């Protein structure tokens, strides 16, 4: 299963490979106790959750020190896979459901991630600012943009203005129509990056917020 990560990210070091391999043991183990991934979907962990999370890395290669907040992280997606891939960046994972934060933080500790922090609660309670908000289909795009604005720092050190990068499925045109008219929305088909059938209807959405 780890082979699919190597297929698209062939330059991982030994530590990163071991961390990604460990996810294949830890998530099924936790899922028996706390359902953070659909039980029908746990066998597709590497493609549907880990590789899907890493799709953000096909869009941006952040400079060292870039900060990310994962809004509605659930069991740790996309934050934990991205934190493995980008150890030079910092990640803050937020979720309203305490048991999901328990899973994500325990897995992070078990694989010795040192660039991740966690918050149990609502995004509105977070007073820090970050370069990018990342998320996986936790709410409608207009709601996500509204929840993200106060989290985004004005100062940018990357090739893209700071903002929201989220992973969505299907047609998002109806959601984009709910945004204010001056909001820029950039949409990328993940099928352009990955050949697996899972990605045929999946999209990456980038919304500059500075």
Image (cartoon, grey):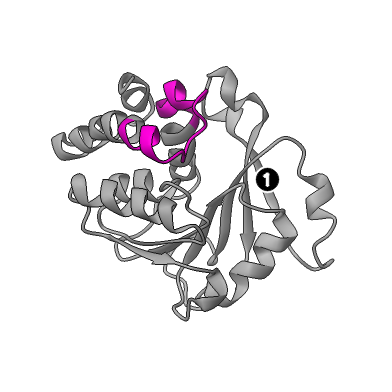
Q: Quadrant of residue 183?
A: bottom right
Q: Is residue 44 magenta?
A: yes
Which residues are drawn in magenta?
Answer: 29-48
Magenta segment, principal secondary structure? helix
SS for tag 1? strand
> x%, y% of residue 85?
31, 44
Horizontal and vertical percent position of residue 74 = 48, 49
Residue 15 in magenta?
Answer: no
Using the image as rendered, state which of residue 98 and residue 85 is in the foreground.
Answer: 98
**Compared to 199, does 116 lie above or below?**
below
Q: Residue furthest bottom?
A: 127
Identify the image quadrant of the C terminus: bottom right
Residue at figure coordinates x 53%, y 67% from the top left: 162
For disc 1, the marked residue is 187
Say left or right for 12 vs 171: left
**Percent x, y of residue 41:** 50, 25
Provide residue 19's location: percent of width, then percent of height.
Answer: 22, 38
Q: Is residue 105 shown above or below 169?
A: below
Image quadrant assignment for residue 190: top right
Q: Which residue is drawn at the image coordinates 48% and 45% (left, top)?
A: 56
Of the pair 109 and 149, the residue shown nearer to us:
109
> Relative to residue 11, is residue 191 drawn left or right?
right
């Amino acid at each position: 299963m780890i082979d699919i990560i190597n297929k698209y990210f062939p330059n991982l070091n030994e530590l990163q490979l071991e961390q990604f391999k460990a996810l294949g043991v830890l998530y099924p183990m936790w899922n028996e106790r706390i359902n953070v991934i659909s039980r029908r979907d746990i066998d597709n962990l590497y493609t549907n959750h880990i590789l899907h999370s890493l799709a953000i890395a096909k869009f941006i290669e952040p400079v060292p020190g870039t900060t990310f907040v994962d809004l509605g992280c659930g069991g740790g997606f996309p934050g934990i896979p991205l934190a493995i891939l980008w150890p030079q960046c910092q990640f803050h994972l937020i979720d309203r459901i305490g048991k999901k934060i328990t899973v994500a933080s325990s897995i992070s500790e078990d694989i010795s991630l040192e660039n991740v922090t966690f918050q149990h609660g609502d995004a509105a309670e977070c007073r820090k600012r970050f370069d990018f908000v990342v998320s996986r289909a936790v709410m409608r795009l207009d709601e996500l943009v509204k929840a993200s604005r106060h989290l985004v720092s004005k100062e940018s050190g990357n090739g893209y203005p700071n903002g929201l990068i989220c992973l969505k499925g299907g047609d998002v045109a109806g959601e984009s129509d709910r945004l204010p008219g001056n909001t820029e929305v950039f949409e990328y088909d993940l099928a352009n990056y990955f050949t697996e059938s899972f990605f045929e209807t999946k999209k990456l959405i980038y919304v500059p917020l500075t």
